[in-house]
Amino acid sequence: MSTFEGLKTDGEAAWRNYMGDTKPLLQVGMGSCGVAAGAEEALAVLRREVTARNIPATVSITGCNGMCFAEPLVMVTREGRTVTYGEMTPERIPALVEEVLVRGGVWAEAALGVSGEEEWQGIRPLAETEFFRLQERRLMARCGVIDPENIEHNIALGGYAALHKALSGMTPETVIQEMNQSGLAGRGGANFPCGRKWDFLRQAKATPKYMICNADEGDPGAFVNRILLESDPHLVIEGILIGAYATGAEAAYIYLREEYPLAARRLRIALEQARARGLVGDNILGLGFKCNLELVVGAGSYVCGEETGLISSIQDSRGMPRIRPPFPAQAGVFGKPTNVNNVETYANAPLIIAHGGQWYASMGTERARGTKMFSISGHIVRTGVVEVPLGTPLRRIFEEAGGGVGNGRPLKAIQSGGPLSGFLTARHLDLPLEPQAFAPEGVLMGSGGLVFVDEGACLVDMVLRYLTFAQDESCARCTTCRIGTQRYVDILERITQGKGRPQDLDTFRWLEGVMRNGNCAHGQASPTAVISTLRHFPEEYEAHIREKCCPAGVCPLPAASPALTR
Amino acid sequence: MAKVTLTIDQKTVEAEPGDPLLEVAKKAGVYIPHLCYMDDLPSYGGCRLCAVEIEGVRGLPLACTTQVTDGMVVRTDTAPVRELQRGVMETILSEHPDRCLTCHRKIHCLPNWICLRDDVVTDRCVTCAKNQWCELQQVSEFLGMEGTGRFYEEGRSWYGAREEIPLERENPFIERDYNKCILCARCVRVCDEVRGVGAISVTYKGDKARIDTPFGIPLHETNCELCGACVDVCPTASLMDKTTKWAGLPDKLVSTICPYCGTGCQLLLHVKGERIVRVSADAEGAVNKGQACVKGRYGLDFVHHPERLTTPLIRDNGAFREASWDEALDLVASRLGDYRGEEFAAIASSKCTNEDCYILQKFARVVMGSNNVDHCARL
Amino acid sequence: MAGLATTFGSGAMTNSIADLGQAACILAIGTNTTEAHPVIALQLKQMARRGGKLIVANPHWIELCRHATMWLRQRPGSDVALIGGMMRVIVDEGLADSNFIQERCENFDALRESLAAFSLERVSQITGLPQEQIREAARLYATSSSAAIVYAMGITQSSHGTDNVQALADLAMLTGNIGKPGSGVNPLRGHNNVQGSCDMGCLPNVFTGYQSVADGGIRERFEAAWGVSLNPKPGLTLGEIFDAAHDGTVKAIYLVGENPVITDPNAAHIEEALKRLEFLVVQDIFLSETARLAHVVLPAASFAEKEGTFTNTERRVQRVRQAISPVGNSRPDWWITVQLAMRLGAQGFSYEHPAEIMDEIARLTASYGGMAYHRLENGGLQWPCPSPNHPGTSILHREAFTRGKGHFVPVEYRGSLEQPDEEYPLILNTGRMLYHFHSSTLTRRVKGLRELHSEERVEINPQDAVSLGIADGDLVKVTSRRGAVTVRAKVAEGTPPGSLFMTFHFPDTVTNLLTQPGRDPVSKIPELKFCAVRVAKVA
């Protein structure tokens, strides 16, 4: 049984050895984004080059630091400074080796920035770049820094200290107190106060209790959880364990979507390492706390991201959201009290316990505390993941981090919160990023996906795609959802073919009222894409239905009204 | 636990706390339209029809998933409730052949009339085997769905270019026509939760969702026991008894006991003229409570089998010949008259009624003076 | 039923079907419930679904095993050893209900002494079960808040069937699992009205309600009621009747609704016996194999064509109602018998309606005393129902046993009569399947059922099949000391090595040509579940 002090000492030694070695350290960013851009090959070429040329250097991997737009990334550390190089495709690796290792300098043109606060060898600090300067990196502090397959790195940089602190010096009640004080609200989109939710489970009488981490990140355009799980899985594990301690749960599951094979691999490695060190199991850190944590991989259904659908899926039942009551806190997985939180929610717990609820609450806005990760994609210059204080204006994300549309077209719409949410217009860029500000506009801030859409897109066409997704992913319990989404798709399809009727818009509104009667958010909210665009983009529908044209030229219709061109 | 008192449409009702509101209302004589709920099974909340108004509760909650509490005030017949129910019904009907449900002319039609005015004759009411005993039809009538049809011509609605699902009728008893299915999942739940079999489930999702067997294999190749429980609970014509699908409505229902094993299931014989046209399990059955097995449900055709003995037979020169009752009875009586006491034996049947058995042993003991009477209880 | 009568004083299902679903534990032994009693099986499955413990003891894998907490695959014929072993564990580990034993039972010491012979080593050897499994089953059964035993022909159709039943009754009493909800000893009876035909006195030694014909007082009551003097000498049992017919001592038989040529063991012997009769009259709804041997055949109305009552396996008397007129010129059985009685000059046979017959039954039978058609309208009544206001009895032996104290019978293990040997190395077990019934006189006349299963299959374990060179679907010949049948093979894991399984539903393959006539000495039930055979592929 290892003590935490022992683990810490070992970890720090390993980290020093890794970073502070006399040899340079080269880390290839191996998130799914990097892999998709060729990071595996880049890593292979790098290894080959280093071996072939017999260069004394450590070649390793790291996760993604959020700069998905510049993948593959290679981080080169020397003399305690880390320079991040972007777009290090396999073809460019030999050049990097030549510049950085053989010549021993830096490759200024390819460098994105350097760690630390001062310029180094003519390279500006990464933190001062447009992508980074609005960010407050807490959850992501170790993303793109450590080797995510090495628990010692995590521990060396503060991992599991909060768990140790909670187990050795705090009662479950005080943990929940801190959580309450922090003001942390669920990051999966529902925004429910996390401490209160944990308290429900703590109060539940039946045993055993279960803690579930929802890693079924299914919203198109959302990939914040993936980045965390691929880049610092132990942060999430630590958060789940703190939650289990606070609530009295003896067992926990991470429910991961099948589409995240790399995250599954990293989690498996992480769990194995944590078990081997007594951080997961029957007597955690020798402090008498028991929690067994298992990974469950789903089978590809969007509604399994809904907590009760997820619970059914864990039980090997059809992934169908359940009827409530009973609520999971009374009867969840295997009929026992259960708490379900999102990956990012759990990831916040170690920060709160380590630094205190008060410290946490000081960041963000009055009604939305802390930082939040956002994945930005679509028609912007820089796609990736950022972590910003809640309340940061949407515009800063779009213009600074994202670099604007960049292709000369104006911004048309912003999709936030996935298929159960809707679309905002460019007018909404000044909204602060907090859930409460989005709600009056008829959309959700959601779990962190922000998709920017330029004028080249047809919103009726996009809404059709979103509704087709909602239709395909209906679990088929509720007739309103299963059939309602189909009728939306039918009518939208007709509109994009120039066969729309004015009364279709009334039908849209009427059908939303019927679908609000559904059991879960999927059925209730899937018309949001339609309803929000009816509100914010009525002219798009007008053009398709009355003028029989598609201004963006996407639908198989004339780009301008036949009447106008005449 | 103490009973709770609630009000449903101004009626004061007593109930067990936690009972589903739908069931409490039903017992109180208040009908709330529903298509997926089944008595004594956990609520499924799938059809979304049974919405009601409850004072102090936001929106229009479902009666099947609402557990009654003390002091609850429920209204089932308000305008918003009916509007929503009609809305839900309209979505359901958009993918169901619905002329039998919504045709404004149907009140003028007599069975088997050909409607000359309706362009979709092949989907008309009289072409559905479930016409007049269809639960979906009853709910439609209750909600007054005549003339509705917002979605008639939409792409994949019933009258649009909907993909036809082939019938499955490979087994001898149960015919599955999922073109008429509304996915209430009653069949799935009764098969799993009541029968413990689980031969079918909701497969796929979204618009591809369908009730099916694993890998779509024919029913009789699964672990299905062909008990027909799914047919009994189907609210549409999706699941029908294959052999009696078109037998129409019976003249009368006769409740009796199954003649097969010793369980004593109560069955309902659907009788038309002098024929049993269909058999269903009687929900009032003391033992079986609406359940039966393949033999009880589908195995009573022997009653009408052409090989039934219909007249006494007397052996003459090694071969049987038909005889009148008087001749046969006189012959038997006179022959038996030769044997008294232990030369005679009677073998009774455990298939016969108590009264038959009693009379037979009385006959052996009183008339023939013999205690040689036994039956196959030993087998 | 003799076994239960000795122990409890009444040989019927002690509890009710619905009650089984409430049990905390059920031991299902010698019953393939899902095939033979599918609707009762629902209760067992529900019980398991609710978290109850279901112990299935059966040499064969049966569907119920899917729902079971434990499956005990004892060797065929070793049931007494298994139950004795379980009782030994219960006594040794102090799990017996000593209050119940002391207050409600007698003869416990004799049982305890007999258990000395049931060391787990020996029991394990006989049953082929690991000791730990027997121990676990015993603990599960004994420590559950209520535990029921359910059994059927796997227990009774044995040369030591009475021993089997008495051992089960001992087990229930030992743990106080009698006379309370969710407990009891519950035989599942095979035919719709086998309970009723026994209740009605279609037995050689008793009148209705198991009133002994040899008892002078009882006989006097019946003589008074029926207005004749009655034969005090108990008659012959079914097997004895056929033997007597073979010998010529029984000369005339009036046979109603049975087909012994197919269903009884040693079928060839029975056919010969019937052929030797001077007069055979058969009353049935079809011209059965047996009816073909008759001198006169009388056409009976089916259940759907007459009024009456059936008594089910849980002692519930329920109304049978006429749905259609009798087919052709057929008549209800009671009517035919009444006509014969009147033609033979008997008095007391003038009934207008079966309700009057039931009234007479009620007058003469204490347990049916409160039965009358008007009371049976909704769901019937369970006997004993002694008076017109009695609500019926769902659980027997609540306060005391019918015979007073529950009588422990010492257990003794005896092997089956015909053990496999070199010439006949395999054990043949017989039973039922879901889609057919008994001799299939009825079910094979249902087109759909015939389509599903039209012929017999002999089930053989893959291991045996390989060593005998038999493949699935091969035509094989199964031979016993008494006869041979040719049948297709079905290679199935569910059948244990060393055993074969056949049903007795198909008249083209008369399985009972193989079975042996050895009977239980008390109940006279033949050992249909165990005989030695050999099997070989037909070239």
Image (cartoon, helix red, strand yellow):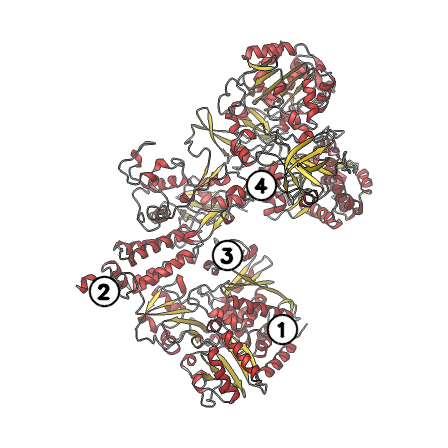
State the residue at coordinates (32%, 62%): A461
| Co-location on one chain, circles 4 and 3 | no
Check if mark 4's residue and mark 3's residue have beta carbons within 8 Å: no
Mark 1 or mark 3, earlier in chain: 1
Measured in 3D between alpha carbons, the distance from the residue under mark 4 to the one under mark 3, in whole angstroms, is: 29 Å
Please state the chain letter of the residue tagged with numbered disc 3 in the rendered image.
Answer: A
Please state the chain letter of the residue tagged with numbered disc 1 in the rendered image.
Answer: A
The residue wearing badge 3 is A327
The residue wearing badge 1 is A168
Measured in 3D between alpha carbons, the distance from the residue under mark 4 to the one under mark 2, in whole angstroms, is: 67 Å
Hey, which quadrant is residue A278 in on the image? bottom right
* SS assignment at label 4: helix
Q: Which mark is residue A560?
A: 2
Q: Residue B88: where, in percent of width, then height?
A: 37, 49
Q: Amino acid at mark 1?
A: Ser
Mark 3 nearby-residue class (10 Å; few <14, some 14–19, many ≥20): some
State the residue at coordinates (61%, 80%): A14
Q: Residue furthest front?
A: C539
* Residue B40 makes an appearance in the image: no
Q: Amino acid at mark 4?
A: Leu
Measured in 3D between alpha carbons, the distance from the residue under mark 1 to the one under mark 3, in whole angstroms, is: 32 Å
- In this rendering, the answer to whether A218 lies above or below B168 is below
Check if mark 3's residue and mark 2's residue have beta carbons within 8 Å: no
- In this rendering, the answer to whether B43 lies above or below C317 is below
Hey, which quadrant is residue A151 in on the image? bottom right
The residue wearing badge 4 is C42
Q: Amino acid at mark 3?
A: Phe
